Image (cartoon, rainbow, N blue to C red):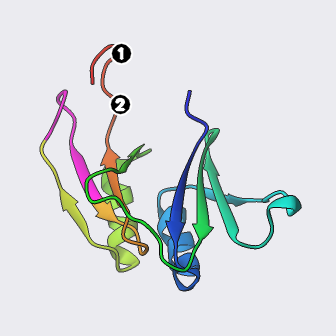
Amino acid sequence: MIHHVALEVEAGDVASEASFWDALRFRAVPVPEALGDSYTWFEREGSQIHLIEVADPMVPSVGHVAVVAEDLEATIHRLRDRGFEVERGRELWGEPRAKATSPGGHTVELMAAAPPAGQS
């Protein structure tokens, strides 16, 4: 099990990132005080997204986070209603997919369902 993914963002993107991850049903969780003020964490069903504020964030050109949406159509609508662009992708394993870009520039794949066990 992967517990969390850490993404670098500029400090000015944290509020809009919070709206983005909230639309994906991730909720803010406390960050240990020992880490300081440069971190913001979100969690859904035991998986976390850690935002790390840096002056010059690195954003992979192809690498991405994939999230199984509770309801893909409702998730796409929530993102679009908040002003985020969503592009529908091709179906894999008989399930629809889409991609969105977070305010910090990170690609997030939205999946209606995870692939069957043993498939990638």
Element class at badge 1: loop
Q: Which residue is drawn at 27% across and 19% down?
A: 119
Query: Magenta span: helix, strand or loop, mainly?
Result: loop
Q: Which of 72 and 40 is in front in this view?
A: 40
x and y, in percent, of residue 97 in the image: 23, 46
In the image, taking residue 81 as reference, residue 42 lies left or right, namely: right
> Which residue, as the protein is rendered here, is positioned at the far right?
33
C-beta proximity under 8 Å, tags 1 and 2: no
Q: In which quarter of the image is the C terminus?
A: top left
Q: Which amino acid does label 2 sit on?
A: Ala
Residue 35 appears in which quarter of the rendering?
bottom right
* 118 is higher (above) or lower (below) than 76: above
x and y, in percent, of residue 9 in the image: 51, 72
Q: Which amino acid does label 1 sit on?
A: Ala
Mark seen at residue 79: none
Circle 1 residue: 117
x and y, in percent, of residue 69 in the image: 41, 46
Report if residue 28 lies within the magenta region.
Answer: no
Circle 2 residue: 114
Q: Which of 60 and 25 is in front in this view?
A: 60
Q: Residues within 10 Å of mark 2 (few under 14, many from 20)?
A: some
Q: Residue at x 58, y 55 (%)?
A: 26
x and y, in percent, of residue 71 in the image: 39, 47
Q: Nearer the viewer, residue 85 or 57?
A: 57
Q: Quadrant of the N terminus?
A: top right
Element class at badge 2: loop
- Residue numbers of the magenta segment: 91-99
> Which residue, as the protein is rendered here, is positioned at the far bottom?
12
* 60 is higher (above) or lower (below) than 67: below
- Measured in 3D between alpha carbons, the distance from the residue under mark 1 to the one under mark 2, in whole angstroms, is 8 Å
> Which residue, as the protein is rendered here, is positioned at the far front?
56
